[in-house]
Image (tube, rainbow, N blue to C red):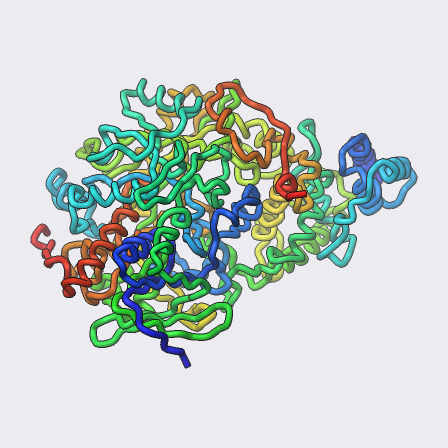
Amino acid sequence: MATTLDKVEVVTVGVGWTGGIIAAELAKQGVQVVGLERGKARSTEDFQHIHDEYRYAIRYELMQDLSRETITFRNHRDERALPMRQLGSFLLGEGLGGAGVHWNGQTYRFLPYDLQIKTMTEEKYGKNKLGEDYILQDWGISYEELEPYFYKFEQTAGISGEDNKNSAPRENDYPTPPMKETPITKRFKDAAKNLKLSPYHMPSGNLSENYENPDGQTINQCQYCGFCERFGCEYGAKSSPNVTVIPTAEKTGKFELRTHANVTEVIYEGGKATGVKYIDLQTGEEFIQPADIVVLTSYVMNNVRLLLNSGIGRPYDPESRTGVIGKNYCYQILPGATGFFEEEKFNTYMGAGSLGASVDDYNGDNFDHSNLDFIHGGVIAITQTGKRPINNNTAPNDTPNWGKEFKSQSIKYYHRNLAVGVQGASIPHRNNYLSLDPEYEDIFGYPLLRLTYDYTEQDRNLHNYLTEKSAEIMKEMGASRVEPREISDHYSIVPYQTTHNTGGVIMGGDPETSAVNNYSQMWDVENLFVVGASAFAHNGGYNPTGTVGALAYRAAEGILKYREESGQLVKIVNDRKHA
Amino acid sequence: MTEKKTSKMSRRRFIKNSSYAAGGAIGGGFLGTVLSKNLFGNNNENQGQKQGATNNESTNYNQALMYFTRQSDFEILSSATERIFPEDDNGPGAVKLGVPFFIDHQLAGSYGRNDREYMRGPFYPASDFQGYQTRLKRHEVFDVGIQAIERESKNQFDTSFVDLEGEQQDQILQKFQDGEVDLKGVTPTTFFELLRSATIEGAYSDPLYGGNNNMEGWMMKEFPGNYMSYINEIDKKDFIKKEPKALRAHIAH
């Protein structure tokens, strides 16, 4: 029997960037918030022995324990989905701070085009640019409306960067100046300029200088030690929830953090969410935490799964193309090119997660697609994130992956290769979606989430075009040999690609086609907010965290508003009139 | 006989390797006392090295078996890892780097037991895109795979894997990578990929795990390991070679 606890005003499920932002913003206004986090507490003190590639980057110490829960995967609807038994393609986080602990810190804003992608694409290219199997939708909010929230997140995180004419327009400068220029970033910028592109320094959550944010939290200057992605920062120099919003929430005295609290269901009665059910993983006890407002702030996968397992919202059905929960799952397409330099060695073992340089000339609708067989594009960038030796054994394509030649070539080129890569936009397709698995369960007996996903024609065309552009830049950088990346026959769950999963509880202006409004408030359940990249109606051509942060600040404002006004915060706009 | 001859050749090559180790690297104790005996028998040719090593190096008590129960299995593993990551002009191969002990120790712990992975059934054959789908845990995959290496070796060459010439060992291993061997409960490619990746992990992980002996894996790659800051060097044009440091430096004394 579950023990029912005293009711609280707000409960969040998960305490990472989104949960931390909600907690900080609400607690600062005197609202009582309980944060339920299934992992353990952790802070900068836990990261003093972090320079251990094997433990953190290979055995994934900071990531989700899949023995309790994973997802199942298949490429197509007519296949049997099988469990993702080991982490691979993406790395689900677990523990206080979530993936905000082990991210790289590359912090962009999605483009105005992203937020109104359907309207703008149709205006320029007509209604059937991609065909009817693709599901383009506006996000139910304009860039101008979202701009202040982007800035709010950048201020909290202290983002280091510089403006660029092709990026989303800014009302304010970045809070801190860009990171250092290195021979690698300079080389990329010079080549890009030669090709008449407009390069800029990558906006970074590893800070260029010591910084105090508006909440009084200090983020330290990055030391360029080369251990960011998959690691926590031993300096508190990588912006994370743990050094910003979580301590901000805690110092109000209104926020209570409960770790090892694994939420299994949202309690749904009479059209409202009345609380959540969770299991204390240390004792096995089951609790019900009643709340006025429930906020789902876990990762994309679990936001979707909790709704489906709680019977909330209408599950998406790809056959009839009805329902919304699980719809528009997107990933990211990763074009690029590797350059081998026979005569030069670079200090690639040094770096920081978001030390890099970028161009947006081939992102969004910054270039004409009239004669192209795809829409959108992506940011093309070079990064110097710190190459570590187990994971970096790049050698020319014709090299075997073991034996004498492998060893000598991978050693030879270790400091002699650079890569230009793209965060390619991912456009929703009717057959790419999330649902409950009919067969596999977690340790508590709840169905696992099932991912059905494969690359589309749009993805392949985008990949090929941007790979060509990446190879041009790499060639201009003076590589002795340039190897373009290839896209595999089907998406595979095995090799690491990116942890930029999006969709499933998407935002929009119409409850028929979206699950939440632009405050991340559910259309069907007014006191339930679902925050994060699960709200992305498609995935843009950037790393998602800047946009996730903006949506979280917008959601926090919505929750405060809802406490005063109740009811739906946004009037329904039926976007089918555009159809 | 041809086979004896090749076997002697590999012995000679091995002796060359062990003198490298005894000449100063920390791996000398390991090579002299354990490997030369295990891989090639306790023969006279190795005695000198063995004594030299024992005299000059303190014994590394960490280099003993945590997982494998038969030394012969461990020797097959050792030979296979050496083919995947061989000694060459750059420096030591898997054996001198301690990779076989690294793998043995990993198999005894959470890696070998798949502690943090979803191992609930049912198990079905997978497409090439669905990943690891065996009910066997990693330690069991290694058991099955190593036995199959020996079986294939005897079938094809009528000789134990550890006594084959290097190129012959490569032929056997290639069959596993290409999926041309019948294994029970796991595909040969899954086993080979585990073996291959574990070998590289052992060569380059922090020496605290028992591989990357004396940081020689890092030295070959000019990876400096664990430095706390490059803020004053990140913008320098020339390549900067640094003495490697391991995590041991972080333990307060």
Q: Quadrant of the C terminus of chain B?
A: top right
Residue A536 horizontal side relative to residue B39, left or right:
left
Seen at 62% across and 41% down, the residue is B250
Residue A489 x/y as whole percent: 39, 45
In x, y percent, where is residue B194?
A: 59, 50
Q: How many marks?
A: 0
Find residue A570 and report its image quarter.
bottom left
- Residue at the (38%, 61%) spot, across then down: A79
A519 and B96: which is toward the camera: A519
| Image-based side of A450 in relation to A514, left or right | right
What residue appears at the point 9 percent right and 50 percent down from the top-left corner? A578
Residue A473 lies, with reference to residue B199, above or below; the image says above
Rendered location of residue A68, percent (x, y): 48, 65
Q: Nearer the viewer, residue A179 or A271?
A: A179
| Screen quadrant of the N terminus of chain B | top right
Q: Is residue A183 above or below residue A11?
A: above
Residue furthest left in the image: A577
Most extreme residue toward the right, as rendered? B44
Query: Could you say where residue A558 lies in the image, as x and y percent from the top left?
Result: 20, 56
**Residue lying farthest bottom?**
A1
Image quadrant in which you'd find residue B56: top right
Q: Is residue A468 visible?
A: no
Residue at x 30%, y 41% (from the top left corner) = A154
Is residue A120 at least partly visible in the picture? yes
Q: Is residue A210 above or below residue A293?
A: above
